[in-house]
Every structure is written in C-alpha cells, then in structure tokens.
Amino acid sequence: MIILGIETSCDDTALALIETEGTGLNTRCRVIASLVHSQADLHSAYGGVFPTLAKREHGKNIVPLLHKLFTDIEPGTVCVSLEHFTKTLDSFKSLQETNPDLYESVIHAEFLKNIPRIDRIAVTEGPGLEPALWVGISFARILGSLWNIPLIPVNHMEGHVIGSLLTSDTAMGTWQILKPVHFPALALLISGGHTELVTIDEQLKYSIIGQTKDDAVGEAFDKVARLLGLPYPGGPHISKLAHEAWEQKIPSPVSLPRPMIGSKDLNFSFSGLKTAVLYAVRAGSDASGVLSDDFKKGLAHEFEQAVTETLEAKLRKAIDETGAETLIIGGGVSANHVLRHRFQAVADEYAIPLYMPTRHISGDNALMIALAGSLHTTDTPRALKADGTKRLDK
Ligand code: KG4
Ligand code: ZN
C-alpha cells in the first residue's frame, strides 16, 4: 500500500510517501520520499510560532512541495478530466475565502490532474495550531476527492510515537521492519506543544497517565532561549550553551527549582522554572540590561539540568507504576543529547529497550504521519476510480 502523509500542525509543512506491507506493528515499510519545509526563520522574529503566518505559509508552500515530492518518483499517467477537476474545486469554493493561498495554488497546479499511484492519504488532524492544521486537512480533502483516495486522520502525538519505531529515516527505498515493541509500552512525548507520559497496549490504545499542567517542555526551552536573547526555536541553542558551560566548567549563577519532581502524580510543570529563569536574568543583567556570556552559559546548563532531572524522575516513576517493557521517546525535544543520554541510562538500568527517533525525524515530519496512518489501515487497496477513469494497476 502506498501512503501519502501530510503534516501541517505547527510551523513545518511536511509531505512523505511510503510503501507498507503487513498490518499493525508487523508492518514493513520503505520510504519513497520525505520532505519538510521549515518556517522557523520566519517565526523567529515573533519568538515563537505565529498561527496566521503559519497558515499562510502552509497554503503557499504545500502545493509546490507536493510537486517536488512527485518529481523524483514515477507520477501517475491517467489524468482526471477537466470536468472532474473543475467540479472538485467547485465543491471547495469556500476555500477561496478561508484560504486563498491554498486555493490559488491548487487551481494552477496542472500536475494534480495526474492520478498518482497512491492508496491512502494520511493527514494530521490534531493536536496542533488550528489554522495551520486546516491547511493540511483541506488539502488532503481536495486530493482525496480529486483522485478518489480515502483519507486516514492521524493524531500528531501518535505520529511521534510511531516515528520512533523506524530503524532508519534516511535509507530511502530500503525495506525495514519496525523496532519490536513489548507491552505494556510507555512513551514520553516531549515537544513544543506537549509533555506527556502515555501507556500503550497491544491494540495500540493510548492512555495519558501524566502531562504538563502549564507549559510544554519545548515551550519552556523556547521561552528561556528568548529570555537569553537566543533565536527560535530555542532548544538547540540552549543545548549548545549548556554544553559549553559543561566543557568550560562554568558554574551556574543560580539554583533553579525542579518543579513537581517529588509530587505523587506523573504530571509536570515548567512555567515556574521559566519564571525562575526570568528573575535570574533580571538579577544578573548589568545596568544596560546585558548578560555576560558566562552567565548565559551557566544558566542554560542549570536549566537543562533542571529539565533533565524532572523528566528523568517522572520517567522512573512511570516505569515503576506501569511495569513498562518498552520505552519510547518522541517529539522535537528528544533531539537533546543530554536527555537522550539520561534516558538511555534509565532504560539500561531497568533493562528494557529504549526507542528514540533518529535525527532527521525527531522534529515534525510527514513520514511518521504516513506510517502511523498505515498502522490503522487493514484493508487491501482497491482499484479506485476517479470520475470514471480507471486507476493504474500496480
Ligand atoms: O515536535 P516538534 O518538532 O514540534 C511540535 O510538535 O511542537 O518540537 C519542537 C520543539 C521546540 O520547542 C524546540 O525548541 C525543541 O523541540 N527542540 C529542542 C531541541 N531541538 C528541538 N529542545 C531541546 N534540545 C534540543 N536539542
Ligand atoms: Zn511534533
């Protein structure tokens, strides 16, 4: 089965094509193509993601990105009729007002008249920024109607879980099996919008057993980075400064709290930590509001330590409480080296396998969405028809 994945939940416009065989976690897959167009530079000026800007950019970029995705692969050769093309777009006329960028882009995209060899379209339906999500969903609906291909709605957080089970994201075209999961499995999802501990059973049913009460951990990294005058997204910058502090043995100027580290539940809180950084920054700035480089490095290191200790403590508690047999870490913050190192140490101590995403798919991407979508599809692809035009047989 060939699946097109579409992801627009935040500031990355992402598309991917994968081929899968088998069902559920026994699925084998190969990556045909995967592209991510990041808007991070544009949002940097706002210190975070600006939803209306994200929507506009997705609307402008998603059609050219699909064209690029199709450039390297064999496109379909059967064309939808002009009548069907017009009729389909007529039924999406409201987009002209709600998302003119996407509508304009679609009506001028001649290549969309070629029906590709695709069996399903998997699209992120949430959670995420609503205006941004709608671009992907609307585009998926247009493509689904135009090519008569069923859609699979995918939860973004499940995408992060399943993405961590890929053995390689770069070996394009090579068949791979998913990493073996033993149940109950426990996932720690750490991204710009979420911080969650989730249990997973054999049926791929997810239960949230702990989550942040305020800021997500990635959001805390981004806000602290902003306080230190670093660009968005702040995680990698904080991590770099923290590493320099460690290398150069620069002490922290303050001790930061480890929020909720001893609480009885599995929840998190990061907004107090961010506020403590704010006070430290105010106290540590010189008369003209400037912080020394060493101060920034020491504080970044202390912040990273506080986050690491907190996440590690709750992860241990969750393993103890659930008897987890497999650990899965997902979300953009999982790119952090110190965290990865600590999570590995915890998994080694408990002697359970730990799966973290490879470098290219720790952030948002459509590969994980296509793959998560495929796990929820058991029926074999039908010979679909688009407006009386027979689809190509594979
Ligand atoms: O999963 P993701 O790409 O997007 C969301 O779904 O939110 O996560 C993005 C978050 C940002 O907050 C970014 O600062 C953080 O991941 N991040 C990091 C690192 N790389 C990205 N945080 C800490 N250390 C990193 N190396
Ligand atoms: Zn994400």
Image (cartoon, rainbow, N blue to C red):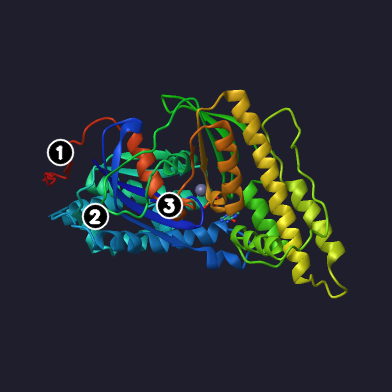
Which callout, 2 or 1, points to the residue nearer the camera? 1
Image quarter in which the N terminus is found = top left
Q: Residue at x 30, y 35 (%)?
A: 27
**Label 3 Cα crowd, 10 Å radius (few <14 / some 14-19 / many 20+):** many
Q: Indicate left or right for 204 with 146 as reference.
A: right
Closer to the chain start, of discs 1 and 3, is 3
Gap in Å between the C-alphas at discs 3 and 2?
Answer: 31 Å
**Label 1 Cα crowd, 10 Å radius (few <14 / some 14-19 / many 20+):** few
- Which amino acid lies under the numbered mark 2 shown in the image of this protein? Thr
The residue tagged 3 is 365
| Residue 78 - label | none
- Which amino acid lies under the numbered mark 1 shown in the image of this protein? Ala
Closer to the chain start, of discs 2 and 1, is 2
| Residue 383 - label | 1
The residue tagged 2 is 86
Of all residues, the one furthest to the bottom in this rendering is 288
Q: Quadrant of the rendered structure where residue 371 is?
A: top left
Secondary structure of residue under mark 2: helix
- Which amino acid lies under the numbered mark 3 shown in the image of this protein? Asn
Q: Quadrant of the rendered structure where residue 181 is?
A: top left
Q: Quadrant of the rendered structure where residue 311 is?
A: top right
Whole-percent x, y for residue 376 in the image: 35, 33
Whole-percent x, y for residue 184 in the image: 49, 25
Q: Nearer the viewer, residue 44 or 235?
A: 235
Secondary structure of residue under mark 3: loop
Q: Nearer the viewer, residue 259 or 366?
A: 259
Q: Nearer the viewer, residue 328 or 156?
A: 328
Q: Residue at x 71, y 45 (%)?
A: 270
